[in-house]
Structures are given as C-alpha cells and as structure tokens.
Amino acid sequence: MIGQYSLYEWLIFFYIYSFFGWIFESAYVSFKEKKWVNRGFLMGPFLPIYGGGAVMMLFVSEPFRSNLILTYFVGAVGATLLELATGVVMESIFKIKYWDYSARRFNYRGYICLASTILWGCFTVLMNELIHPAVLSFLEMVPALPLHIVSGVISAFFVLDVVDSVKEALDLRNMLEKMENLREEVLRLRKRADVVIACLDDSWRDFVENNPAADKAGEIYKGLELRYNKLKQSVMEIDILTDAQKEELGELKERLNMILEQLEKLRKGKTQMHRRRRKRLRIRILGNPTMTSARYRFSLEALKERIKESREEESKGE
C-alpha cells in the first residue's frame, strides 16, 4: 500500500485523470484555436502532467482532507513543484518547452506561474470533494477481471505511446538542430559577402541595415541574389573586383543556394524520415501551439510557419 491505495489503484487513477486532463486541454485549446487540437506530448488521449498532478494532489493532501485550506495549499504547492520539475527535465532533453507561461504575470522562467498554481489548488479541493469520490464509486461498480484486462491493455498502449513519442520529440529536436546549424552558416556567409562587396556599393549596406529580419535565410538570399546579379552586370565587367573576390562571391552564392535548398527540404519534411513519423511530427507541433525553444527559436518558428502554410494550402485544395 502507498498511502490508502495500492500501486495498482494509483495507476488506475493516473490513467483516468490523464484522460480527463486530455479532454479538458484539448477542448480548451481547440476552442481558442477555433479548430480541433489533439493536445499534449503523447499521441493517445492522455496528458500525463494532469494524471501525475492528480495523483500528487491526492497523495500529499491525504493527511489534510479534513481541512480544506491545508488541502488547497498542499495540493497547489505539490502539483506546482511537479509541473516545474517536468518542464525543466523535458526542456533539458528535448530543448523545447511544451508549455510556456512567459506571457503570464508572476511566472518562473515560463515553467510555472501564479495562475496555474491557484488553479492546481482549486483542482485539489474539487477533486477531493467531488471528482475523486465519483471516480471511486464508478470503479466499485466495475468487476475486477474486466478492470484488470482494460488496465493491462491501456498500460501496454501507454508504454508504446511514450516510447514512440519520445522518439518523435528527439526527431524534432534533431531537425531543429540541423535547421539552426544551416541558418547560422547562412549568417556566416552573409558576413563574408559583406566583406567582399560592402565597400563597392552603399545599397548593399542599406539592405542589411534596413532589414532587421535579415537573419532569415530567405531574406538573406534575396538580398544577396539581387546584389550578385547587379555586380555581375556592372562591377565585374569593369574589373573593380579582383579575380579572387569574384571567385569567392560566386562560391558564396553557390553555397548559400545549396544551404537554402537543404533548409527548404527540412521545412517541407522531405528528409529520409518515414512518412508516418513526419505526419505525427506535424500533429505534435499543431497539438502544442504554445511550444517554444530558447535554443532553436528561429528554426521552430520557421517550421511552424511552414506547417501553417501547408495546412492552408490543403484547405484551399479541398
């Protein structure tokens, strides 16, 4: 026994409240986004943070159930600490925040915030007084054998889902890392191009200074392409550039073009990744519209934008 329940009973509670959490989050986010969103880290109908939070709230508040105030504060603190630990661990592994409270007041590094802590406390009281007694009453009506069979099937499905979802999250991390490395190389190429041609024409410097979004690969290439063509027609013809500068500028353009093709392939998902995994990766991003990444911020936003454009194209085609 762990507290007043067995390990098996705690596991059943975890699954039930993970499912309830998935219903709540998916309905709430779908309403905000005005379209269906399969919320959460897993592909199945479970949100483990809610299941774990519910189990945590029930366990830590058990000695204080006769005192609603203590039940509230103990549940709020316990669930908040769990949310903090989960957020820190997930970001350290996957380099992505799957939820981010940075825009809310009184938050700590986006992992937790005062509003969520208050809600956790309210959920603790509500669960102890209303929800959990109803769940217990329902479980008492279910025969032991069917309950064991169902819980066994759910456990197998849950483990497979966790394993598959972790692999997909690592795939996403690796994809973003490749995109970020390519983006950084594009920036280095632009700096090299600046050195080669900035002294020849003020319009190149004007382009760089007047484009705060010039760290985006497409913008960089657009500007470099225009300058390259202009130089090829004028400057190069009158031999203002040395042969070495001409050769370097040509190499820069060729290398940049190759990098942009790689970036576009990554954004469109035209890699060696299996079609099913690419589809689930897209579902993962769409199912977590507030996900952020301090390390891969530009690449994640570019990927989100590409998925949004793809979805709009599909809608127009229907």
Image: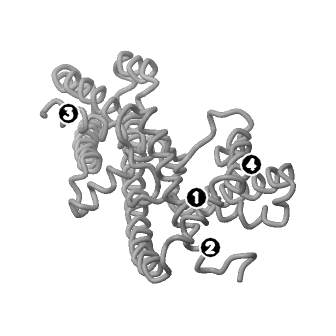
Q: CA distance from mark 4 to mark 2?
A: 20 Å
Q: Nearer the viewer, mark 3 or mark 2?
A: 2
Mark 3 and mark 1 lie on one chain; the one further toward the N terminus is: 1
Quick check: 233 left or right of 289? left
Element at label 3: helix
Quick check: 105 left or right of 208? right
Mark 4 and mark 3 lie on one chain; the one further toward the N terminus is: 4
Q: Are marks 3 and 1 in contact (CB under 8 Å)?
A: no
Which of 152/277 is in front? 152
Q: Residues within 10 Å of mark 3 (few under 14, many from 20)?
A: few
Residue 128 placed where, x, y %?
Answer: 71, 57
Amino acid at dot 4: Gly
Amino acid at dot 2: Trp
Residue 286 placed where, x, y %?
Answer: 37, 44
Residue 177, image quadrant: bottom left
Element at label 4: helix
Element at label 1: helix
Q: Which circle marks residue 301 in the picture? A: none
Q: Nearer the viewer, mark 4 or mark 3?
A: 4
Q: CA distance from mark 4 to mark 3?
A: 42 Å
Label 1 sits on residue = 49
Q: CA distance from mark 3 to mark 1?
A: 33 Å
Residue 82, image quadrant: bottom right
Label 3 sits on residue = 315
Q: Residues within 10 Å of mark 4 (few under 14, many from 20)?
A: many
Label 4 sits on residue = 121
Quick check: 289 left or right of 76? left
